[in-house]
Image (spheres, rainbow, N blue to C red):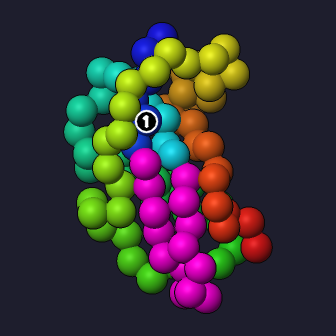
Amino acid sequence: MKIAVWDTYVKRKDGQLMHFDILVPDTLKDKNIVLEYVKKYLDTKSFEIVDLTSEECRFCHMEQATWEIMEKIKTHGYSIIEIENCDE
């Protein structure tokens, strides 16, 4: 399965900048759906964010998915790779 990687930066209310990738099927072209997945992921966090707009989430590249990522996408529609400041 090929996936699209969307590079995402979100400013937290505590001033830290979150950086994570959201991975979706390569056939998903609707940025609004990708942003809805980002909101779902952010809802799992206990801290607040300043704002989320389409400027914070940009298509980066395509790649081949691992089995683990494919399973997450089949179950949830997306997968997340946390890079910076995604924990408390």
Q: State how many labels appear.
A: 1
Question: Which residue lies at the image location 37% right of the left edge and 31% below the top edge?
Answer: 61
Relative to 69, residue 87 above or below: below
Main SS of the magenta part reads: strand
The residue that label 1 is drawn on is 5
Front residue of 35/17: it is 17
- Residue 71 seen by the camera: no
Find out whether residue 77 is within the magenta segment: no
Which residue is at the far bottom? 14
Is 37 left, or right, of 60 in this rendering?
right
Which residue is at the far top? 1
Q: Characterize the local packing of mark 1: few (<14), some (14-19) or many (20 or more) Cα atoms within 10 angstroms.
A: many
Q: Position of residue 54 (x, y in %)?
A: 27, 60
Q: Which residues are magenta?
A: 7-20
Is 61 left, or right, of 15 in this rendering?
left
Q: Position of residue 20 (x, y in %)?
A: 55, 53
Which residue is at the far right? 88
Q: Position of residue 52 (x, y in %)?
A: 37, 69
The quadrant of the rendering that contains the C terminus is bottom right
Q: Quadrant of residue 72?
A: top right
Front residue of 8/72: it is 8
Q: Amino acid at mark 1?
A: Val
Label 1, secondary structure: give it: strand
Find out whether residue 17 is within the magenta segment: yes
Front residue of 1/40: it is 1
Q: Position of residue 63 (x, y in %)?
A: 46, 21
Question: Which residue lies at the image location 55% right of the left edge and 18% below the top edge?
Answer: 65
- Residue 74 seen by the camera: yes
Question: Which residue lies at the image location 59% right of the left edge and 79% below the top edge?
Answer: 16
Front residue of 79/57: it is 57
Is 78 left, or right, of 59 in this rendering?
right
